[in-house]
Image (cartoon, rainbow, N blue to C red):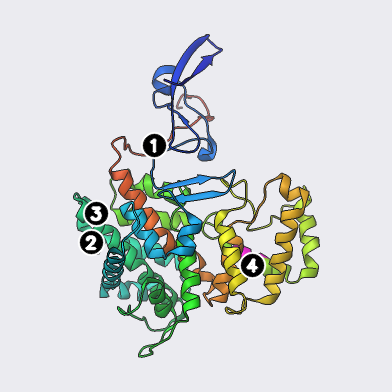
Amino acid sequence: MNSVTLIDNRNQNSYEFEILDSTIGAPVIDIRNLYRDTGMFTYDPGYTSTASCSSAITYIDGEVGKLLYRGYNISDLATKGTYLDTAFLLLMGYLPSIEERESFDIELRKRSFVHEGLKEMFNAFPDKAHSMAMMSSAVSALSTFYFEHLNVKTAEEVQIMARRIIAKIPTLAAFTHRRMFGIPFIYPDIERSFTENFLYMMRAYPGENLKIPEIEIKALDTIFTLHADHEQNASTSTVRAVASTGAHPYAALSAGINALWGRAHGGANESVMAQLEMIASVENVDAFIQRVKDPDDEFKLMGFGHRVYKNYDPRATILKKLLDQLKNELQVDNNLLKVAEKIEYIALHDEYFIKRKLYPNVDFYSGLILTALKIPRSMFTIIFVIGRSVGWVTQWIELQNDPEKKIARPRQRYIGEEEKEFI
């Protein structure tokens, strides 16, 4: 058995802790009995060095820029398959056969309709309600229509629950968009595939047989695939934490949506687009780069650097190639694209960025593509929700099947006052 020894210099006691190997990636020190044995906790703000669970879903190697779903490279999944292939893989653990893919597709089409009562809930929201607030509320409300999912037990029941939420989230997302603009809701079209259906519900008017260009469907489908899961990030950890209490699975996903809302997480691509517009022209780039380097200036370049990746984000690599392929067909804003390209060039060649490993991340390119798809900026994070829904529900399933599952309950380092007499 491999182990590490902790020496407490205060009393010269030593404690041994087992090292647990991973399939690939960093091993972990098993400190579950740390407090029992030593009377101490670890101190790790932001959990930067803490593994909260064992998982077989997603693997990230941040040093080389690698992302695997169930052992498959994200590049292969995004360029050779569809989002539904990835969704099936995450849920079932293997890629579907042709027959399984068709059956899965048809099942999600049929489950994409939502209860009419939800339309009334959307109509009750104020005109200026934030899209993420409406989305989290709608997903939470689904637990009232499918309350029986609180106690799913068999594998079949779990899959019904999971596929139901994955199918309905694009419909709720489209309803969110249409409520924001005060236009009539469009029901799902059972003749259309998953990604095409979402674009149809976003864009069409009642009675219109809208044709969605295949190139736009593929672009958005790729973005969904790239966002399907990403290990134990803030929103996924939130889903697991809420799920560990025994809450309804849809309530756990609603909590994940709220966590994703933050601009340091799912809202980052919205901030990238706002910053590109602020820079406005290629001539202004150098001045903003100097601001980034100025230690007395709080200005930060959005879309660069990542908590895990210390190399090029593999998702950004895929989106960069996609953007290069589609910039003419999708009529990407040429001015903003030139600004982005100059910033990217500087970041990849300037010693300041190289030394700090500030490489472009997925948010730097996704906003440009979503803008070209005529998706409003208010819906950028909602797009993230659609893609990530399968990852969240897969993580929920894995947690339920974990024999070591415990309620999430971190400890703290107390730095307040000592006990005082009440007078």
Q: Are marks 2 and 3 in contact (CB under 8 Å)?
A: no
Residue at image mark 2? 146
Residue at image mark 3? 158
| Mark 2 vs mark 3, CA separation in Å | 12 Å
Badge 2 or badge 4: first in the primary sequence: 2
Residue 161 percent across, percent down from the top left: 26, 58
Q: Residue furthest bottom?
A: 207
SS type, badge 1: loop
| Res 254 seen here | no
| Mark 1 vs mark 2, CA separation in Å | 28 Å
Mark toward the viewer: 4 or 1: 4
Neighbourhood count class around disc 3 (C-alpha, 10 Å): few under 14, some 14–19, many 20 upward: some
Residue at image mark 4? 274
The stretch in magenta equals: 271-275
Badge 4 or badge 1: first in the primary sequence: 4
SS type, badge 2: loop
Badge 4 or badge 3: first in the primary sequence: 3
| Res 242 seen here | yes
Q: Are marks 4 and 3 in contact (CB under 8 Å)?
A: no
Amino acid at pointer 4: Ala
Left or right: residue 117 versus residue 388 is left
**66 or 132: nearer the eye?**
66
